[in-house]
Amino acid sequence: MNIGITQREMGDKVWGKYDALEQNYVTYFAEFGMTVIPIPNFSQNIEDFIESTEIKRIVLSGGGDVDPVLYGQERGGNVSYMPDRDKVEMKLLDHALTKGMPVLGICRGMQLINVAFGGKLRSVREKNCKPKHVNTRHCVEIIDEEMETILGKESEVNSFHGLGLLEED
C-alpha cells in the first residue's frame, strides 16, 4: 500500500530551498508493508499527485512549527515558518477528508490538523507548563481501531516540539 508523507522544508545559501524526509519514516512504515511516497512542499495539483501515485493514506510528518498566522496569532521570535508546507498540508488534509482517506498527524502534523479544525497552539516551553514536552518521551493513546492493530493501545513517542494544543475552557 502506498502512503503519502509530507517532508521538512529546508534551505540554505548554497542549495536554496529543498525538502527532506527522515529515513526512519521509510523504514518504519516498510515494516508494515507500506511504500512511502514523499510529497513535495510546493504548490501543485494535490489531487492529480495523489491519484497518479495511488496513495491510499496520508501522513503529515513532524518538523518545524505551524505558522501562527493560521490560528490568529502573530509570528514571533527567531522561528522560521514554512508557508509553502502549510499550504500543501492543508490541501492534502482537505483532499483526504473529501475522499475519506485516513490521515495520521505526527507531532507537527497533529498540530496542523488541530489548526485546520479551528484549534490553536500554545508554547510548551513555559516553566509552569505541565507535562513537560520539550526533549522528552511520553505515551499517547491510540484511538483508531486500524492503527491500534498496528501500534497497540498505547505508543511511546518523543517530543522535541515547543508547541502544544491550546485547551479551551
Image (cartoon, grey):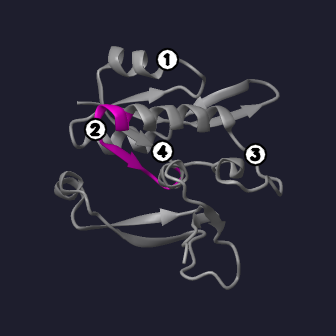
Tell me: residue 144, above or below residue 31. below
Give the mark toward the camera: 3 or 1: 1
Residue under the point 57% across and 78% down: 132
Tell me: residue 167, above or below residue 129. above
Q: Earlier in the sequence, mark 3 or mark 4?
A: 4
Tag 1 residue:
45
Q: Secondary structure at mark 1?
A: loop
Quarter of the figure with the N terminus: top left
Q: Is residue 35 left or right of residue 48?
A: left
Percent x, y of residue 138:
43, 73
Percent x, y of residue 155:
32, 65
Mark-to-mark CA distance, 1 and 4: 20 Å
Tell which of 55 and 11 is nearer to you: 55
Q: Earlier in the sequence, mark 4 or mark 2?
A: 2
Kindly identify the amino acid type of the residue bearing the numbered disc 4: Ser
Tag 2 residue:
30
Kindly identify the amino acid type of the residue bearing the numbered disc 2: Ala
Residue contact between numbered discs 2 and 3, judged by CB atoms under 8 Å:
no
Tag 4 residue:
61
Magenta stretch in the rendered image: 96-108
Mark-to-mark CA distance, 4 and 2: 16 Å
Mark-to-mark CA distance, 1 and 2: 27 Å
Residue contact between numbered discs 3 and 4, judged by CB atoms under 8 Å:
no
